[in-house]
Amino acid sequence: MEEMVFAGRQGRPMTDSEHHLFESLASDVAEFDAGATAAKVEPTLPPGPSPALPPPTTPPAMQAQGMINNDHAAEICRICLAGDAAHLASGLIAEGVSIAEARERVGATSTIREAVTHAHRMAPHAVPRDQAAAYLAQGLSVQAAREDLFARMVAAEEATSISSHIPATRGNAGHAASISSMERELRRAGRGKPESP
C-alpha cells in the first residue's frame, strides 16, 4: 500500500502489481461497505427541534440516499486509473464529488503533466521533468501551474545574454593581423620580402 501512495505522490503510473493490489483493496472495501450497509440500523431521533444538518459533501442524489454509492466510488476509481491519477481517487471519493467533477480534476492533472512536459522540452534547464509532481502535491490549478512555468521560462530566457555584433577573432586581431596576413600571402606568391632568420 505504501508503494501505491509513494507512486501517487511522485506522479508516476502504477506498476501491474500495484494496480492489482489496488483492485483487490477496492473490492475488499466494496465488500466491507456492502456488509456495513446491510447491517445498518436507522437511529430514532428524540422528539423536539431537529439539529441543523451538515452541508452536503456528496452529490445530491447520494445525499438523499444517506450513503456513498459503491458504483459511484468505483467509477471515480476507474476515471482516476484511466487518467493516470490513482493518487486522487481516495480524496475525490472522500469529498463526494460528482463524476463530472472527478473527470474535470483528473483532466486537469493530465493537462498539468502535458504542460510541464512541453515546458521541459522548451527549457530543460529551467523546468525539471518532475515538476508536475510538485504542482500536483501542492494542489495547484492548471492556470497557476502554467503561470509558474511561464515565469520559470522567462527567467531562464532573461539569464541568457544575446548580442547582435560579430565577435572578434581570437589572437592577432586588427591592423597588425591584416599586415602579417598580407605579407604571408605575398611571400607565398614570391613577391614579398624574404623572411629574416
Image (cartoon, rainbow, N blue to C red):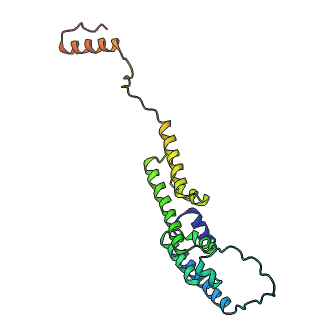
Q: Nearer the viewer, residue 105 or 195?
A: 105
Residue depicted at x 35% and y 15%: 174
Asked if residue 78 lies left or right of residue 195, the reply is right
Which quarter of the rendered picture does the C terminus lie within?
Answer: top left
Q: In which quarter of the image is the N terminus?
A: bottom right
Judged left or right of residue 24, residue 49 is right
Q: Position of residue 31 (x, y in %)?
A: 62, 88
Is residue 14 shown to the viewer in this render?
A: no
Residue at 63% x, 85% y is 65
Q: In front: 150, or 167?
A: 150
Question: Where residue 173 appears, x then y in whole percent?
Answer: 36, 17
Residue 129 visible (yes or no): yes
Task: Point out residue 115 in the picture as x, y percentages from the top left corner.
Answer: 47, 55
Q: Is residue 167 above or below residue 191?
A: below
Residue 127 position, x and y percent, is: 51, 49
**Height in image: 81 above or below 182?**
below
Left or right, residue 8 beside residue 37: left
At 54% across and 63% down in the image, what residue appears? 11
Q: Which residue is drawn at 57% across and 82% down?
A: 24
Farthest front residue? Answer: 49
Q: How many labels does the image show?
A: 0
84 above or below 113?
A: below
